[in-house]
Image (spheres, rainbow, N blue to C red):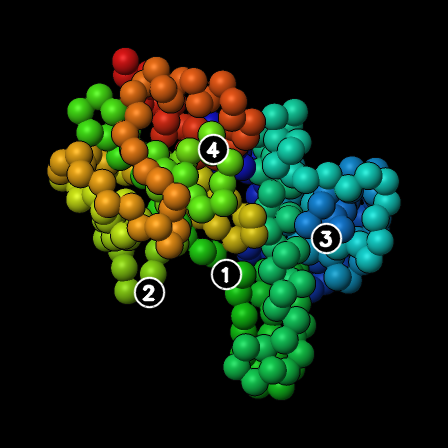
Amino acid sequence: MLAYNGLALDRAPDRRADTDWITARRAHPATRVIAFWHDKFLPDAHPTATADAVFLGLDGDTAVFAADLPDPTGEPHDVRALVSSLAPAEAATLAYARGILHWHRNQRHCGACGGPTDARDGGHTRQCRTCGKLLFPRIEPAVIALVTWQERCLLARHRGAAPTAWSTLAGFVEVGENLETAVHREVHEEAGVRLADLRYEASQAWPFPAGLMIGYRAQAAGPRIAVDHRELDDARWFTRDEVWSLLATHQRTDSIEQFLVGTWLAEE
């Protein structure tokens, strides 16, 4: 299972709009509150579920909330740095909490009229006090593709990245695009490569802060590369042996990129 995809909570969409039910869950002694501070997880903090706490869902009969604290209690932790030590369901819950709290901090005012907004539905919507506009958590879809040509795959190094920091190509979906069009555009825009074939592989929740990654495998129409140096330092074709060597120095393993590359390597 891809990291952050293992959420086991019942989001209870039929209950979270019930203010009385949410209030009772906040006051229940068994309720769990996951604490954050500036996007960092606070495992040593155990706050109560105040009115600002966001309802995440039910773990069996136990309500789970997330809360942003004004000051840290204990050592703050980056969720991504902890993921290898967490069960899939816990990693997904912490990522979910981080993402929705980030949205609340950045949606305190209405984008239409500038008025202040208040949380509703247990924290899953906000409403402008001035014009009444309803605001919903924003998801930013991005495509990521492993492109192959014969027995090689295409990797790129972004400007300013370390010499060994090669990665697959990825980018946000633009207005009016479907996912497949976005893959074709991104690969050609950044590396000058045209695609002959494309297929969906998997998706991954990526609330850092609001992403949804959609992964593809693509076959190039030819080996020609024309790098867009506004974004990339370089792009080239790698053999499997070269990719194995790169992975030996790669520290992060929570991205869908590792799944796409690993699937290709396993076909050897």
Q: Position of residue 211 (x, y in %)?
A: 48, 50
Q: Are marks 1 and 4 in contact (CB under 8 Å)?
A: no
Left or right: where 106 falls relative to 157: right
Picture quadrant of residue 31: top right
Mark 1 belongs to which amino acid?
Arg
Q: Which residue is mark 2?
A: 175
Mark 3 belongs to which amino acid?
His
**Does label 1 or label 3 sit earlier along the sequence?**
3
Q: Are marks 2 and 4 in contact (CB under 8 Å)?
A: no
**Does label 1 or label 4 sit earlier along the sequence?**
1
- Crowding at label 2, few (<14), some or many (≥20) Cα neighbours within 10 Å? few
Q: Which residue is mark 4?
A: 163
Q: Is residue 50 above or below residue 61?
A: below
Q: Are marks 1 and 2 in contact (CB under 8 Å)?
A: no
**Does label 2 or label 4 sit earlier along the sequence?**
4
State how far apart marks 4 and 3 are (Cα): 31 Å
* Residue 138 marker: 1
Instruction: Name the front one of labels 2 and 4.
Output: 4
Q: Which residue is mark 3?
A: 38
> In the image, what residue occupies the spot 77% across and 62% down?
51
Mark 4 belongs to which amino acid?
Pro
